[in-house]
Amino acid sequence: MVANLQAQLYLEREDSKSAGRYAEEAIRQSSALSDEWLKADSLADRAESEYWRFASAENVDIEKAVRLSTHAHATETLARALRCSAWIEQDERKMTNALGLLQRAEVLFQRAGDSRDAAIGLSDMANNQQFSGDPYIALVRQSSIIPLIQQSGKLTYLEYLLTDIADDYGALNQIQMRLPTQSRPCRLRAKSKAKPEKQACRTN
């Protein structure tokens, strides 16, 4: 149990290498104890650490975490696994799949009483809209959840969110510059081009 908590602490600190090391230890301990809930949670930890380190085993660990957490009724663990799966889908530009997974994860976080991770899920959904090429909708959604992210205490996510909002303002300015500049109203002959896709960035 302690190793599992250590893994989650290092994930909070964005130290995915250390998180992965403690997750490995937690998986060994949970297997020895035949503790299905703990193993599911530890697999979700390792999957997330693998995601941030571009490790190839992330999908396997997510699938195991989803299966075990479903069987063990570990609601929050299932939410974390689905969220990590959504990140992968988003990186692969499978936006519809990613949004569906993020929505499921947000509902589960709410059900588990985890308002902080539920708020983070809303931020992820706003980012999904941003990657899909609609900066206006992304900007509206991102701006509306600033108070929730502030209340969550997750300052790193707040930093990411504010950066994304600045990017979307820039994209909207580019669209505005492409609009016809005439003294009377006129129709736009063609739809504005979507904002260039933003490459998802994983660190550590």
Image: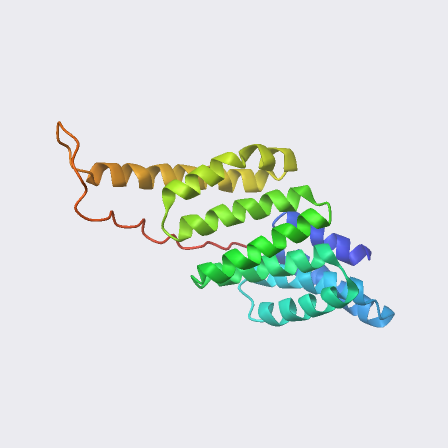
* Rendered location of residue 199, percent (x, y): 40, 55
Q: Is 103 displayed left or right of 38 in the figure?
A: left
Q: Is 85 displayed left or right of 143 in the figure?
A: right
Q: Nearer the viewer, residue 180 or 186?
A: 186
Q: Is 147 displayed left or right of 65 in the figure?
A: left
For the C terminus, the image quarter is: bottom right
Q: Nearer the viewer, residue 173 or 61?
A: 173
* Rendered location of residue 164, percent (x, y): 44, 42
Residue at 64 percent across and 70 percent down: it is 63
Q: Nearer the viewer, residue 91 or 55?
A: 91
For the N terminus, the image quarter is: bottom right
Residue at 35 percent across and 54 percent down: it is 197
* Rendered location of residue 48, percent (x, y): 62, 59
Which coloring applies here? rainbow
Total labels drawn: 0
Considering only vertical position in the picture, is 125 above or below 169?
below
Residue at 59 percent across and 59 percent down: it is 84
Residue 32 sits in quarter: bottom right
